[in-house]
Structures are given as C-alpha cells and as structure tokens.
Image: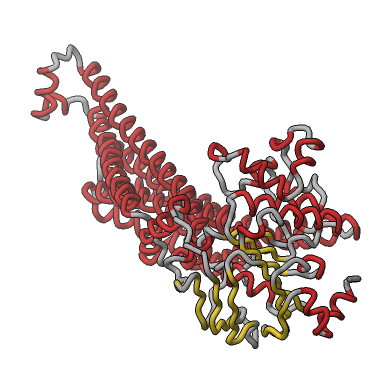
Amino acid sequence: MLKIIKKILKLLTPKERWQLYVLFGAMVFSAFIEVIGIASIMPFLFLFTNPRLIHENWILSQLYSVFNFQSVNSFLIFFGIVVFIVLAVGNLLISLTFWGVLRFSWMRDFTLSKRLLIKYLYQPYASFLNQNTSALGKNILFETNQVVKGVMIPVLQIATNGIIGLFIFVLLAVIDLKLAIAVIVVLGLAYAGIYRIVKHRLSYIGQRRFQTNAERFKSINEAFGGIKQIKLLGCEDLFIARYAQSSAEYAHHNATHEAISQIPRYLMELVAFGGVIAVILYLLVTGRDLQKIIPLLGLYVFAAYRLMPALQQIFSGITRVRFNIHALDAFYKDMQFFDEDRYRSSGNKKEIQPLVFQDSLKLAGITFGYPGASQPVLRDFDLAIKANTSVAFVGTTGAGKTTIADIVLGLLRPQEGKIFVDGAEITDDNLSRWQRNLGYIPQDIYLQDDTVAKNIAFGVMEKDIDIKKVERAAKIANIHDFVTGKLSLGYDTVIGERGVRLSGGQRQRIGIARALYHDPQVLVLDEATSALDGVTEQGVFAAFENIVRAKTFIIIAHRLTTVKGCDIVYMLEAGQITAQGTYEELMETNVNFRKMAKVHGQ
C-alpha cells in the first residue's frame, strides 16, 4: 500500500499534494468529532438509567444549577439534544470530508487525463509508428478514470475509514482494553483471512480486465474505422463477435470483483451480531450490574454500527485497489518524468518566429531506419534543395520518398547525419522555428467533423480564424467555387466525420487549402494530388504557378504528370538517388523513368 501511495503522490503536482494533506487533516478532525459523538452516548445512557448522578457528580450538578433546570427530565432532554447535535456535527463533517474526497479525486480525473494527453501529443512522431492509437485513447478516457475511481478514491476512503476505526478502537480501549482488543482482533482477522484467500484472484482478473478493455476499444475502433469495407463485404457479424468476446470477459471480471468486494459484508454482519451477544455475556460473566451494562452495551452497539461500515469500506477499498493496480502501473509508467511546464513552454507556437530560409536546405549524411526494421531506409543520404525551387522525388514503393519528406518536416529525426537551413543546423532547440516555414499536404487528409472554414484553418482558435486567408487558400486549391456554390452554408457547412459528405478529390483540395492557409515558405506534397482527376490536378498546379517562384515545393509523386513542371526530379531506389534532372531530361536519358511514365500512361 505504501508503494501505491508513493506512486499517487508522484503523479500529483505540489499544489495537489498540499490539497491532499489539507484533506487528510480534515479526515482526522471529522473522525475526532465523530468519536466524541459516539463517546457521548455512554454518559447519556448512564444518566438515563441512573438520574441521581446529576446531583452526585459535581460537574453535572453545576450545569444543572447554572442553567437553572426545573427538573431532572428537562436536564436529560437538554443532554440528549447536546448528544444529538454532536452526532449531527460529526456526520456533517464526515459528509463534507467525503464530498471533499470525491471532488479532489474526480478533479484529478480531469487533470491527469489532460496531462496524459499532453504527454502523448508531445511525443516524437516516430513514437506513434508502433503504437495503437485506440490504446492511447483508452488510456486517456478510460484507464485514467479507472485509476481515480479504482485506486485514488479507494485509497482516500481507506484512509478516512482507517482513521475513524482507529479512533473508535482507542475509545473502546479506554473503556475496556481487553474487550476492545478482542473486538478488533476478531473483526480484523476475519477480513484479513478473506482478503488473503481472494487477493491472487483479484490480481489475475484485474490484469485480464485491463487487457480485455484494450481489446474492446481496439475492436470498436476497427469496426467504425473500416465501416465502408464492412458494409461492402457484409461482415458485420465478424466484428460484433470480436467485440462480444472481449466485452463478455471484461463484464465477467468486473462482476467477479464486485462480488468479492461485497459478499464479506453479509458474513461480517453475522460476526458483528454474534459479537454483540458475546459482549453481553462477557459483561454478565464479569459481574457487571444492569445499570452499568446498559450504557456500556449501548456504547458498543453504536460503535459497532459505525465501525462495521468503516471496516467494510476498508476491505472493499483494498480489493478495488488490488483489482485496478494494473491501470495505475500503466498510467505511472506513461507519466514518469512528465514536466507539464516544459511541454507548455514548447507548445506556444504563436510566438515562435520562422527560421530564415533564403538560400538552401541541405541533408548531409542522413541515415534513418524505422524501429524494428532490419535495414535502414536511408543510409548516408545527401541532398541540397535551393530556396524557391520545385523538386520532386519519384520511385517505387519503399524507395524512401515519404521518409525523406518526413525528415524534412522534422517528424522523423535521423539516427545519423544533419540537416542545415541556410547553414544553420536544425536541432531540437530550433526545430519549431523551421516547422513554422512548412506546409504539408499528405495523401490521406484528416478532416474534423466541423465546418469547412475550421478544417482549412486547422489548429486555429475559432475567434482567430481569418476568413480572407481561408478564401485565398481555397481559391488556390480550386475549391472556393464548390464551397460557395454547392454547399448550403458555404464555409460554415459542417462536412461530417472525416469529411464523409465530400468526395475524395474535395477532401484532398481542402487539405491543400489547409497547407496554404498560413502562407508557408515550403510546401511538401506527399502524393497530394493522387485523389484528383487529371483536369482538377492541372487546375491545382496551374494555381500553384502563381506562387511557385515565391515558395519551395517538395513533391512526392506517383503520377509523373505531377512532376513535369519541377525544376529537378530525383529518382530514388533503396534510399539512394539513382538519377536526377528535369522531366524532359530523364525521359530522354533514363530507361527506368521512361518505363514508369509508360506504366502511368504518359
């Protein structure tokens, strides 16, 4: 349990730890007031069974005189009201403390999930190549909740109820030490024995819950991600079966855990009832008279009434922690060495000034291999691109074209070699400045379920969107007429999830407009016009001609018509440049280039 508490504390900020310490102080104070309320039951019952004590006890007699009570009954009523008020205040404090525990814990669901999202989003791009994004989403939206609900809240409840139980034990020990020890030993050993029996089972089903939950999210993500193919093939039942298998096991393990955490309650109620009978017999055997037995018995009954729920919640909390420990371990592993201030300072891109690019971009001795690959894609690769020129890379699949584009974009960092912009080396310190110069148009355009304007001004707050810049970019991408003439709300039209209401070519042109919105110095087109028909492609590149000498174009091409107007075309094979020249020069001198052109009907 101490290791778990240390992990929780390390996940919290200094301010959150301070709030937790204050909350712990409130737990102690409310437990103290509660025990005072329980303790007040005994003297009240003593007075009720023996009213003569009011005049025999000096303190009580002084109270009786000072407040000028007219009868013993009025004094007993007054004393009963005081006891009730103390109990009510104790319950109120316990309720407020419980509310504080829940509020603190659920606010951590917000802050921890936010920090995990920050951690994931600021990972290097290469980190996502071997990760299932559905698992990342599950960790943020579900497992963080599980850490809070299944570990943090139970730990705080264990602390709260543990303090209450300790104070009650001290009270009972003051009254009768032997009897108090006997009560705690019997109840404690009973719960400890049950936990010892089930703890390994809890650990196993907790691990399987974590795994089957990941499988549930993965199957759902795959089902909706491939909905078009699923409908075409009519294989809905296959994906339903995949989900059902993991989901059924997930439900079974949750049910088992809930049963294990609650069933002992009924057994312990029987133990507690038997304990009350045992206390009565003990008091009778020890020769206590009835007037002394009733107040003492009332105290123990009321103490048991408060102690049993506390012990049950401690047991239930321990089982929940054991069941969800795998979620905490996974979260802790992901959040180690997290520094939110560092991410926040690096994320303020608005204030970053673009790196000066007026001369050339150079890749010198670049070697890069993907994680798990036996051979690098690029080895000792050199390239120089002049500013305000257009270059293209062509070649077969796997030649390294997209890898070069991703290295230029700074998404992939080479294992060896350096990148220079106007003689300045690109490092982690100035990478963001270089990326401020870049516009990227991929083959597969990601679109939000939002308006056309917000998709073009992607990543810009709604209040900061410049509609004139949106329209300018759309005109260059040859989609402005479609938006204003065919869409009912123009740039305010919502295009659906992943642009489902648009054709492939229309989605591609919105992607092109998005890259142009910020008016970048360098445009990287990775098969960017592959979804466009020939006429539309010609229209887009005709629009590019208006800006081509003011920008640098880096084009990854499949169709060779795309590269006809480029200043230089590089042919790649196995990560090496095998030929270079203009389109016309390569058509004249390179057999492989002519074969590629022939394959594509050029």
Q: Nearer the viewer, residue 522 or 116?
A: 522
Q: Is residue 541 visible?
A: yes
Q: Nearer the viewer, residue 379 or 118?
A: 379
At a point 57% along the width and 40% down the height, the residue shown is 465
At a point 55% along the width and 55% down the height, the residue shown is 140
Left or right for 208, reference 294: right
Q: Position of residue 13 (x, y in %)?
A: 35, 54
Q: Position of residue 100 (x, y in %)?
A: 38, 41
For the image, the number of numbered tags is: 0
Q: Is residue 277 visible?
A: no
Q: Nearer the viewer, residue 84 or 4?
A: 4
Q: Nearer the viewer, residue 422 or 304?
A: 422
| Quarter location, residue 128 | bottom right
- In which quadrant is the N terminus drawn? bottom left
The image shows residue 431, relative to residue 155, as above or below, that is below
User: Residue lying farthest top?
Assistant: 70
| Quarter location, residue 352 | bottom left
Q: Position of residue 165 (x, y in %)?
A: 33, 50
The image shows residue 422, relative to residue 594, as above or below, that is above
At a point 50% along the width and 74% down the height, the residue shown is 420
At a point 42% along the width and 63% down the height, the residue shown is 338
- In which quadrant is the C terminus drawn? bottom right
Left or right for 583, reference 256: right
Q: What is the basis of the colouring in this image?
A: secondary structure
The image shows residue 102, relative to residue 44, as above or below, that is below
| Quarter location, residue 37 | top left
Q: Position of residue 380 (x, y in %)?
A: 58, 87
Left or right for 152, reference 575: left
